[in-house]
Image (cartoon, grey):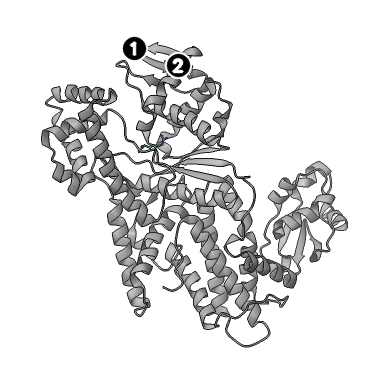
Amino acid sequence: MDYKQLVAAALAPALPDLTQEAILDKIEQPKTSKQGDLAFPTFTLAKTLHKAPQMIASDIVEKVDGSDFEKVVAMGPYVNFFFKKEAFAADILNQVLANGGHFGDAKLGEAGQVPIDMSSPNIAKPISMGHLRSTVIGNSLANILSKLDYQPVKINHLGDWGTQFGKLITAYKMWGSEAEVKADPINNLLKYYVRFHKEDVDHPEMDDEAREWFKKLENGDEEATHLWSWFRSESLKAFKKIYQRLDIDFDSFKGEAFYNDKMQEVVDILEDKHLLQESQGAEVVDLSKYDLNPALIKKSDGATLYITRDLAAAIYRKRTYDFVQSLYVVGNEQTNHFKQLKAVLTEMGFDWADQIHHIPFGLITSGGKKLSTRSGRVILLDKVLDDAVALAHEQIEAKNPDLPNKDEVADAVGIGAVVFHDLKNERMNSFDFNLEEVVRFEGETGPYVQYAHARAESILRKAGSPEIAVTGQTLSDPAAWDTLKLLSEFPATVVRASTEYEPSVIAKYAIHLAKAYNKYYANTKILVEDDELNARLALVKSVSIVLKEALRLLGVKAPDEM
Ligand code: ARG
């Protein structure tokens, strides 16, 4: 139990009309430590109880069991709790040291499976910054959920089907070469595709040919299938290089094409339930009662669509994983698509439709402008990572030129900086990408947190890693106290990140903890032989453990030296 929960439990007998949650919600951190460590305000109770807040506060103090606290006092309209600092310090440090990286683990998910649809770039196009956001948010959610005893299943729903492949094959047959594609698949396939769109304006017969090729592909034509599968594997190779740099892996690469033979069932169910309507030759599901546009299931030429494949995928995932939740980490411009998906599944009678959650996120901009493949305003991810690593290298060279494994550390710092920067922003916020800012060692950055961790490790190395035993010695410094309280909040922070599907909760926490620790470190001589040496080292060690674990949850490495 963390100390907020302890306070709520102590208050409960005095507040029979409030739920534990409602009590927890009201508890706040007082402005100064003179007012205690946590406080419960009584203003909002005054109305229902028809009493002055001051009176309510003193009544509550009469009724609470204060044995877990140094004292519990009424101060005006507040009930203020003062912790037993020695016991608190010993308790929290013991928990962290005994559990190590498992501090904060909880058995909430009961091993329930949670597919996470993440990354999901489109074949023959570069991975965009939007796909990067999906990749790192999804990966972090997977880490957070698995810490809480869920079983995440990371699924890369590749965009590997659709009419664009007809265009790509047409373009390749006109201008492409095998050697070119092999040398640089993504850029050259993109080049053909872009050229197709330039030239088909004057040559509409190219569009007919593209439609022909896509039809052949859908009918399993040998040449079309061969080209498609080659484009797919070359693209996937290039994507996997990026995933490797980010150190992110997937449990499944079943993309849109995997559902080709599973869509007839979707159409059959829809027909059975009389949900399909004809509209200008196409088949649609009316969703007006959900205030949504009709979902287009089949085009007039019989071709199926993005949403049809998503319906088949949703059903397949339910059958395969019997999920307790099914997440889709996809940009907020697809909100409407996922609303339609849920609505159609609900109409089909699947009661698990409400276990489906779209986890949307905002745009990454550059110089305040939207990025798009078409306008040429793209930031190439590989290049971003290279530049970030180079910047990290420069800083390490300046700060710690003798570091033995510089390359490895520069990799961890540069790539970690990009990932951290992405995750510290609440996911719905759009943010501007500015590399210099991302890789700074000061400010609210990944390297700042990594550096705090590395400094803690360096002290522990200097101390010669003694057997750290926790006693009840007071860590009297107020900065130590702030750090201790933050450590105790880690488990609840992980839970909040999971219920809000918000890795930024962890990133912000890591920044707070690193700041509190740096303040402590700046004002305290740690390696002095006195009675509190052991307690100080226990604190340093605990900070190191929790910072490293917080970074791990974000998918960021924590080098021991940098
Ligand atoms: N490939 C799509 C895109 O880049 C994202 C796919 C998201 N996942 C899904 N199940 N619809 O826009």
Q: Quadrant of the C terminus?
A: bottom left
At numbered mark 2, what does the secondary structure look like: helix, strand or loop?
A: helix
For the point 41% across and 17% down, which residue is it? Answer: 284
Is residue 453 among the parts visible in the rendering? yes
Q: Report x, y in % for residue 190.
A: 21, 41
Left-right relation of 383 to 4: left
At numbered mark 1, what does the secondary structure look like: helix, strand or loop?
A: loop
Q: Report x, y in % for residue 263.
A: 41, 23
* On screen, residue 385 above or below 297: below
Q: Which residue is mark 1?
A: 280
Give the camera-side residue of 416 and 524.
Answer: 416
Is residue 198 among the parts visible in the rendering? no
**What amino acid is found at the position of numbered circle 1 in the picture?**
Gln
Give the camera-side residue of 279 and 151.
Answer: 151
Q: Report x, y in % for residue 29.
A: 67, 60
Label 1 CA crowd tier, 10 Å (few <14, some 14–19, many 20+):
few
* On screen, residue 307 above or below 374: above
For the point 71% across and 54% down, which residue is it? Answer: 27
* On screen, residue 401 above or below 320: below
Give the camera-side residue of 106 and 44.
Answer: 106
Q: Quadrant of the N terminus?
A: bottom right
For the point 66% across and 69% down, which residue is it? Answer: 93
Q: Report x, y in % for residue 422.
A: 42, 53
Q: Which residue is mark 2?
A: 268
For marks 1 and 2, the one nearer the N-term is 2
Left-right relation of 61 to 365: right
Nearer to us: label 1 or label 2: 2
Assign ligand 1 to one image quadrant.
top left
Number of disc labels: 2
Distance of label 1 from label 2 (alpha carbons): 20 Å
Q: Residue furthest right?
A: 62
Q: Which of the labelled discs sits on residue 230, or is there none? A: none
